[in-house]
Image: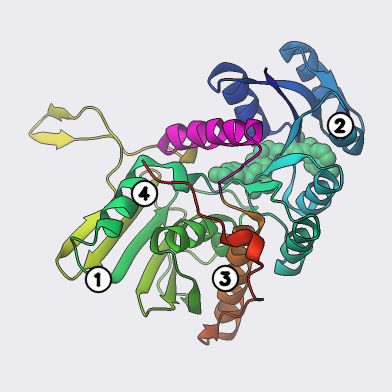
Amino acid sequence: MELKIGIIGIGAMGRDHVERINERVNGAVVAAISDINKDTAIAYAEEIGATFFENAEDLISSEDIDAVVVTSWDPTHEDYVLECIKNNKYVFCEKPLAIEASGCLNIVHAETEKNKKFVQVGFMRRYDRGYEEIKHELQTGTLGETLLIHCTHRNEMVDEGYDTPMAVENTAVHEVDALRWLLEEDFVTAEVRLPKKQTTKTHAKLHDPQLILLETESGVIIDLEVFVNCQFGYDINCKVVCEQGEIGLTNPTYYSIKTERKDSTRVPSDWKERFIAAYDRELQIWVDGVKNDNITGPSAWDGYMASVTTSACSEARDTGERKDIKFEPKPGLYNQKLRETI
Ligand code: NAI
């Protein structure tokens, strides 16, 4: 049976997921869409053969829809996800789960009241082969204890709507989740340094680059450079330094070009190119999980923990101080074993 999916928010990410579900994911079809931009959405619904719902709540409660994908603007996520839980519908919600940690906690409480996980958050890096292989290698223990992690999150450039807080809340949030998952431990402190020396390619509202320092429960220190006007491409690095060696990501590439005494490989242009395989796997595994009534991806609790951590980073940046990261006790619902990697 094909899973009938309704998507709320048909912008860049929503359309990407429509294409993914209809063309590359097995066992699911986009049956309905909803977007506040009505005329564009009606035309798009016709194009893909889906039903248009003017009211997203009607899409969520429709008996013709088995599960929901939320790809609307960030401030709308919390209400739509809560509505899905109320209607006992599985929901895949793009990050962030909610604007504030308290909003994420509302979702956690709604799930715990029903004693069931309905929510998966769009942290696709957990499905990237590079991160999965690093996690697998760390779990074998052959490299010894993990000591330090060096990360970079670099984008070619951003527009003037992107400001200093977004570097943490919209960009570094991916590392925050991926590293928590990689190490299977939480962060205890956050610090953010805004270097005096900035790129001339930035604009008034954005301090670029920024340096984030996180410390985990066991004492692993992570430095994360967020540099979103780096000019040369989308460059994601993660080097884990262990007692017996180092393990890190490489940019997935299948060829190199040798010319004019240079040997070069491509740097991806953006996240869609770099993580395309991860996005596809993320949704395939989610669809399979919904059909088996057992979703195993990033949970509402992971969405909450990411939010608590990024809020501490924002506070650390604004005060110039190192901040403790405090969180509520974890409900038993979220102690289930995670999906095995690879
Ligand atoms: P976008 O602005 O291109 O699209 C958002 C769409 O939502 C628009 O069509 C807008 O009309 C619609 N919308 C806004 N409020 C709505 C409401 N109340 N009800 C129904 N529709 C509504 O934005 P984009 O880039 O597609 O981002 C969407 C979400 O995906 C964001 O939350 C963003 O953080 C997330 N995202 C995640 C990425 C990832 O790597 N996982 C990458 C890029 C975005």
Q: Nearer the viewer, mark 3 or mark 1?
A: 1
Instruction: Judge by depth and name the residue closer to the eye, 53 or 230.
Output: 53
Q: Tell me the SS state at disc 1.
A: loop
Amino acid type of the residue tagged 3 in the rendering = Thr
Q: Tell me the SS state at disc 2.
A: helix
Tag of residue 295: none
Amino acid type of the residue tagged 1 in the rendering = Glu
Instruction: Judge by depth and name the residue closer to the eye, 288 or 235.
Output: 288
Q: Is residue 118 above or below residue 146?
A: above
Q: Earlier in the sequence, mark 3 or mark 1?
A: 1
Residue holding disc 2 = 59
Q: Is residue 249 in view?
A: yes
Give, as a single range, the part of the protein colored magenta. 273-297
Look at 36% across and 40% down and name the residue there.
342
Amino acid type of the residue tagged 4 in the rendering = Tyr
Q: Position of residue 42 (x, y in %)?
A: 84, 20
Classed neighbour count for the residue bearing mark 4: other residues with Cα under 10 Å, few (<14), some (14–19), many (≥20): many
Look at 79% across and 27% down and name the residue there.
33
Q: Are marks 2 and 1 in contact (CB under 8 Å)?
A: no
Q: Nearer the viewer, mark 4 or mark 3?
A: 4
Residue holding disc 4 = 131
Classed neighbour count for the residue bearing mark 3: other residues with Cα under 10 Å, few (<14), some (14–19), many (≥20): many
Residue holding disc 3 = 309
Q: Earlier in the sequence, mark 4 or mark 1?
A: 4
Residue holding disc 1 = 145
